[in-house]
Amino acid sequence: MPIPTAIRLHKASKTLELHYGETRYSLGAEFLRVHSPSAEVKGHGKPILQHGKLNVALTGVEPAGQYALKLIFDDGHDSGLYTWDYLHELATRQDALWADYLAALAAAGKSRDPDESAVRLML
């Protein structure tokens, strides 16, 4: 289980920086929010597509024992524990996971922007 050697919250850039020795990863708040391990996002066997999270920010990071982090977002979401394994997976698979997320949004006709909604006309 890879454990970060350093963790930094950058509120201005809305990112969480994880260091694994000399390797650094920067994970955006929106990315972390839409990939939350909580039941609200993961569902109970059926994931719930998160949308409208473009402007979400991280307001806090708390340790959860010796195995995870609790991330606190400004939209009120603070459930779900990001284990060391899950954080490492998010960091190392960020590009593929983000591409999959954007494709799912497009397929569902949803937007990252909370002030935008798509309407499909059936003609």
Image: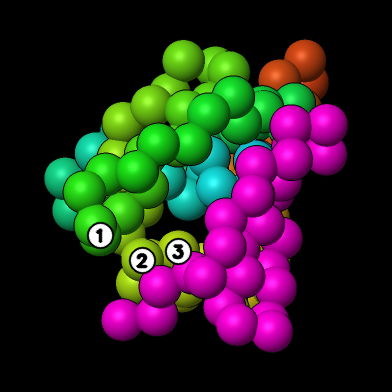
Res 117 quadrant in image:
top right
Q: Amino acid at mark 2?
A: Trp
Tell me the mark number nearer the camera, choosing from 1 and 3: 1
Q: How many marks?
A: 3
Residue 5 falls inside the magenta stretch: yes
**Can see residue 104?**
no
**Can see residue 30?**
yes
Q: Earlier in the sequence, mark 1 or mark 2?
A: 1
What's the magenta bit mostly, secondary-structure-wise? strand
Q: Residue at x 68, y 69 (%)?
A: 25
Distance from disc 1 to disc 3, alpha carbons, whole Å, reads 11 Å
Q: Which residues are magenta?
A: 1-28
Residue 85: image x %, image y %?
34, 72
Q: Are marks 3 and 2 in contact (CB under 8 Å)?
A: yes
Q: Residue at x 25, y 60 (%)?
A: 67
Please name the residue that numbered disc 2 is placed on: 84
For residue 16, above or below residue 23: above
Q: Are marks 1 and 2 in contact (CB under 8 Å)?
A: yes
Q: Amino acid at mark 1?
A: Tyr
Please name the residue that numbered disc 1 is placed on: 67
SS class, disc 2: helix
Distance from disc 1 to disc 2, alpha carbons, whole Å, reads 6 Å
Res 101 quadrant in image:
bottom right
Please name the residue that numbered disc 3 is placed on: 87
Q: Amino acid at mark 3?
A: Leu
Distance from disc 3 to disc 2, alpha carbons, whole Å, reads 5 Å
